[in-house]
Amino acid sequence: MKKIQMVDLQGQYQQIKETVDTSIQSVLDTSTYINGPLVKDFQKDLEDYLEVKHVIPCANGTDALQIAMMGLGLQPGDEVITADFTFAATVEVIALLQLTPVLVDVEPDTFNIDIEAVKKAITPRTKAIVPVHLFGQVANMDAILEIAKEHNLYIIEDNAQAIGANYTFKDGRKQKAGTIGNVGTTSFFPSKNLGCYGDGGAIFTNDDELAHTIRGIVNHGMYTRYYHDVVGVNSRLDSIQAGVLKAKLPHLDSYCNARRNAARFYNNAFANNPNIITPTTKSNATKNCGQICEVCDCHVFHQYTLQITNGKRDELHQHLLEKEIPNAIYYPVALHAQKAYKDDRYNEADFPVTNDLIKNVISLPMHTELDNEQLTFITETINNFIK
Ligand SMILES: *Cc1c(COP(=O)(O)O)cnc(C)c1O
């Protein structure tokens, strides 16, 4: 059996080596390292793929979030609602911009931001909601759009984990994750579903004016060279990374399908285990069809995350490491309990789901190169340990 990896970047590279190498070589041959033609090419390709008017590439997914918030003109003291159970980058940039983070609980089945909790958190100072499409599944955008409309709030989609996912609205219409709110952001960190071979990120929007503002912000606040109209940042996607991404983008849908296939194998293998809850794939159109099928292309399985309900999550984590099965706890600490983001405003009673998830979740190997032998070994090992 091939050695099991959490993410198999080498195996994936070998499949596309020729195109990637040619892309990178063209940058070396022309020395167009910054803002070369490949950056523009990739931008255009991604706009077409996402069916969005503007893609603005930048240096990483954290910058993308920060720049999106700067572009919307959010001001110190403005309250921004986001999920308590996610990677810290989202709350980090809110805090860095001296906005007020308002962390709320998540849904027990999808791990995405809880709609009732969002409603409860709204005050006259609330300016934006940042749904994070966690582990590859799009949050309940029908409901979030309704709330935003009612209270006149911006929506910034943190789409770092769900690029390629489709959201199906109540009326059956579909739209790509990250293009539904006022602005969406993503990361091209190597392990993401569309990853480069270094750092990278992008911002998406259908709003021409916002796109213009953001294009200046990423480039030192310049709209005309050496005329600085606003305080900006320096955040670029370099040409080599753009070349890698341009080579990989045509494979994104098949990558997402490979992930869904692995998820389907896992789901079937754990279906009868009373102490394991498998991830729910759910969209408003299908509610919970319980399957990973075409209609559930709302989930692209950036992570495949189980809940272990018999209290043996930590023992399983150790056991799998002994068996050389990589696994990870995403995430071990609720953001509201992190030293950097603690605040007297938070009440433990408001976070029952997150407080439960941090004790029970475990993420299994998930990538495009998992084979049946590996998946069989992983699932049998787990089913033998958790009964
Ligand atoms: C990876 C990630 C980010 C940050 O992306 P970087 O490119 O590492 O800065 C932000 N939000 C979420 C949900 C992520 O998973």
Image (cartoon, rainbow, N blue to C red):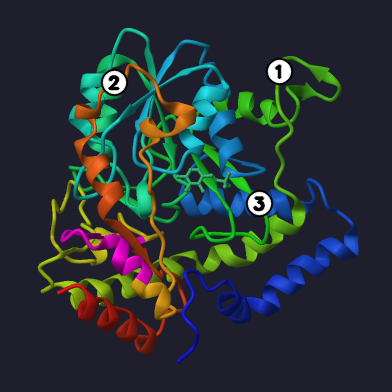
From the image, tell me which residue sits under label 1: 231
Frontmost residue, 123 versus 35? 123
At x 31%, y 61%, the residue is: 314
- Tag shown at residue 199: 3
At x 26%, y 65%, the residue is: 294
**Other-residue count near label 2 (Cα within 10 Å), few / some / many at <14 / 14–19 / ≥20:** few
Question: Which badge, 2 or 1, is on the more N-terminal residue?
Answer: 2
Q: Does residue 274 appear to the left or right of 173 in the view shown?
A: left
**Other-residue count near label 1 (Cα within 10 Å), few / some / many at <14 / 14–19 / ≥20:** few
Question: Which badge, 1 or 3, is on the more N-terminal residue?
Answer: 3
Callout 3 amino acid: Asp
Q: Is residue 378 above or below residue 107?
A: below
**Other-residue count near label 3 (Cα within 10 Å), few / some / many at <14 / 14–19 / ≥20:** some
Callout 2 amino acid: Lys
User: Could you tell me if residue 93 is visible in this image?
Assistant: yes
Frontmost residue, 87 versus 244? 87
Q: Is mark 3 within 8 Å of ligand 1?
A: yes
At x 48%, y 60%, the residue is: 193
